[in-house]
Amino acid sequence: MTQPLLSATSLGFKRASRILLNDINLSIKPGELVGIIGPNGAGKSTLLKCLVGIHALNRGTITVQGSPLAQLSHSQRAAHISYLAQQQQAAFAFTVEHTICLGAYHWQHRTHDSGQTVQERLQAIVEQLDLQPLLHRKLDELSGGETQLVHFARILMQNTPLMLLDEPTAALDIGHETQLMNLLRHHCRLGSAALVAIHNLNIAAAFCDRLILLDRGEVLASGRAEDVITQARMNQLYAEQVMVSHNPVSGTVTVLPLLERQLHHNFTVHLIGGAGSTVALVRTLLQMGVKVTAGIGHEQDSDTEFWQVTGIEHIKVAAFSAITSQDVERAKYLVHSADITLLTEFPIGIMNDENLKLAAQAKNLWLIEEEHTDPSRFHHPDAQQAHEAMKASVPRYSSLGALATIRSILANLTDTNTR
Amino acid sequence: MLLSRSRTLLNKNLMNARAINSRILGLCLLTLMGITFVLSLALGAIKLPVNDVVAVLNLAIQGELEQAQSLYPKTTAILLHIRLPRAFAAILAGAALATAGVASQGLFRNPLASPDILGISAGSSLGAVIAITAGWSMRHPLVIPASAIMGAALTAALVYFLALRKAMMQQLLFVILSGLALSSLLTGAISATLLMAKQYEVSQYVFWTMGGLEGRLWAHVLWPAPAIVLVGLLLWRQAQALNLIALGEENAHGMGLDVPRAQKFTLLGSALLTALAISISGPIGFIGLMIPHLVRLFVGPDHRRLMPVSAIIGATFVMLADLIGRTIVAPHEIKVGIITALIGGSYFIFLIARIQQRGQL
């Protein structure tokens, strides 16, 4: 087993009798990209500052590749750990080149380097980060994204096995954020390790190998993103204002903010669909504050999985088994109690054609019709006939049209409630 | 020596092209300083021919002072006893104040900082006012400088024990507050002392506070010179540390700098340089603030270049200001502190206008 680059045991830190960190244990191995997440004031920055030796510990020990951090000299420490503080403006406008070269301070100092190695390394980093056009610009002429990239280059110049970065992407747009995180990931793949404080949960989940969730100075959970970011924990930390789901494309955990706290718990929409046709609708409806139910779906179908992670009430059957009339009986109460039932477009065959019978029971059924209908989605003519019959008698909407209509219904509801 | 040292230091980190640039820059600056030096020796209440001045200097450098005295008796006498010590006093005071200014601006990460905020000037003034009112200043010309440096050193020690000894990173505000508190305390003590002083003592003190170089002897210059050179070079060694601190104390720590140590060292160094400069010339205002600022506009913010260049420009500037002061209404003199204050004040107003216009320095 490889020796951890850094490990902390029962670490504690307090300032003026206020406990800021309590009993933190962690270790980081080569090649890992670890994210520290948690709400504001959870202790993310404080933890990083303790790990790089800016704050002296009250309790516990920090070990850097086998030797205690407290016993390392400043330059020894800087050879193991680099640290990027949360955005600090430079007091004087150095050139980009000069700023990056400052990263070489500790080893240049020690090896009495003539400048040759610094120049070579600078060239390599500049090429990799595509910084050539900025090289002779001054720091105060750069955008926020460019500045962070320059500081990251400086960290690379320091050439340490472990990088500690405090909110490196906090002020960046999504393009720069992605660029920086990909670079970081790339360097971790090459054998470095990084511990990054990130407040953007989606970025943390998408890029980090492992997450550490802090709350009020304690580790609440740690491990893979999908194990750490759960609806229950997010409800606890962010007062039920966010929704945890899985991105149907990338498969990563996604956290979405819920629009205002105007919940229409008394308004229910039921969705019947499959093969991913309900995902976008469910997400938007949840964000609108509507109560959503769904079914009948098959286990392992992307819709059913999505219903599962978003925690909505739904009816499902085992994978590869046909939906029976008993299942329809089971699901009936959902369509009966829903104000609106939406039937989306999805392939219908003998395994799921009972869903059409379920739809027929709805008190207020809408058909969702997309612009490009797949003509071969009915696998037997009976189902197609049943569907055609429905078409004649119920309203038909596109997804967006249905959502807009529901939104206006909700607006009317709120109006009448407030009056 | 200075030039070759600066070259080796710069070559370390800068590309060849830029090293050549800084060599040219260094040469230009030293030439400028040389010209000012010769001019300030030649011009004054009595004008001396430049050729004679250069000839005497040449002979003096070759160690043939007696020949100079016999060939150019008047020029040699004026140079040796009046103008040379005065020019050296200007060089030392200017270089020391400018270097201290660079160091404290770098340390406080603020281009408007100066060692004055530590109360050093007030401390040296108190030393001077005590020496004057106690009547010691009559006994020997070195008494006022010695008392001034004592006052400054005591103030520096007080600031150190009050704020710095236990100061951690990012507690520089604490240092500044202590300096301010001490400053007002010392200024109060100065006023109280002056209240009980005789009229001519008050005048003597007021003249001293204007900062001047008139009547400076070799004795004034020779003993602080080695200390100024030594502390100046030690501060120059901190230049890279100041560059790191400019990126923020925490980032500097991350890059392997012992930040509190560098901060203490720089603070004490610049306090000491200020005290030494005041002992030579009295408090000359605005050099420490203005020169680093001006130089930064031309050579950029890298402290490794900024510090030596500021020292040279500072020396040249004080020499020039003194030259103007003693030639503009000759045979009367305007004290060098008045000239620098006039230029410095105007420069500051210009700066403020610039900040308002551009939103930046």
Image (spheres, coloured by chain):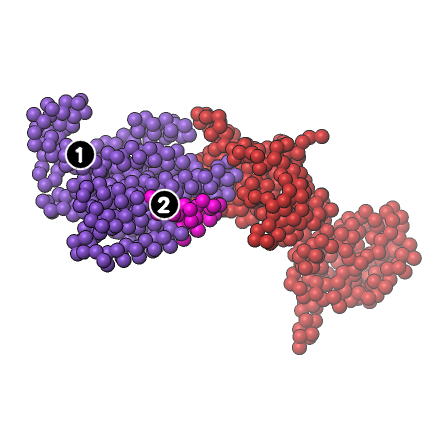
Chain colours: A red, B purple
Q: Are marks 1 and 2 in contact (CB under 8 Å)?
A: no
Q: Left of B199 or right of it: where is A203?
A: right
Picture disc at residue B84? 1
Residue drawn at (61%, 35%) of the image: A68
| Residue that badge 2 annotates | B156
Residue drawn at (35%, 47%) of the image: B155
Mark 1 closeness class: few <14, some 14–19, many ≥20 residues within 10 Å: many
Q: Nearer the viewer, residue B151 or B307?
A: B151
Magenta stretch?
B153-177
Residue drawn at (23%, 59%) of the image: B195
Q: Left of B291 or right of it: where is A248?
A: right
Relative vertical location of residue A262 with respect to residue B118 in this rendering, above or below: below
Does the magenta segment cover residue B345? no
Q: Nearer the viewer, residue B58 or A293?
A: B58
Mark 2 closeness class: few <14, some 14–19, many ≥20 residues within 10 Å: many
Magenta-colored segment: predominant secondary structure: helix
Amino acid under disc 2 = Ala
Could you tell me how far apart the alpha carbons at marks 1 and 2 are, in whole angstroms? 31 Å
Instruction: Choose top left, top right, bottom left or bottom right for residue A419.
Output: bottom right
Residue drawn at (71%, 60%) of the image: A285
Residue B85 picture location, percent across and down: 19, 35
Amino acid under disc 1 = Leu
Relative vertical location of residue B291 with respect to residue A389 in this rendering, above or below: above
Q: What is the chain letter for disc 2?
A: B
Q: What is the chain letter for disc 1?
A: B
Picture disc at residue A393? none
Residue B57 picture location, percent across and down: 16, 28
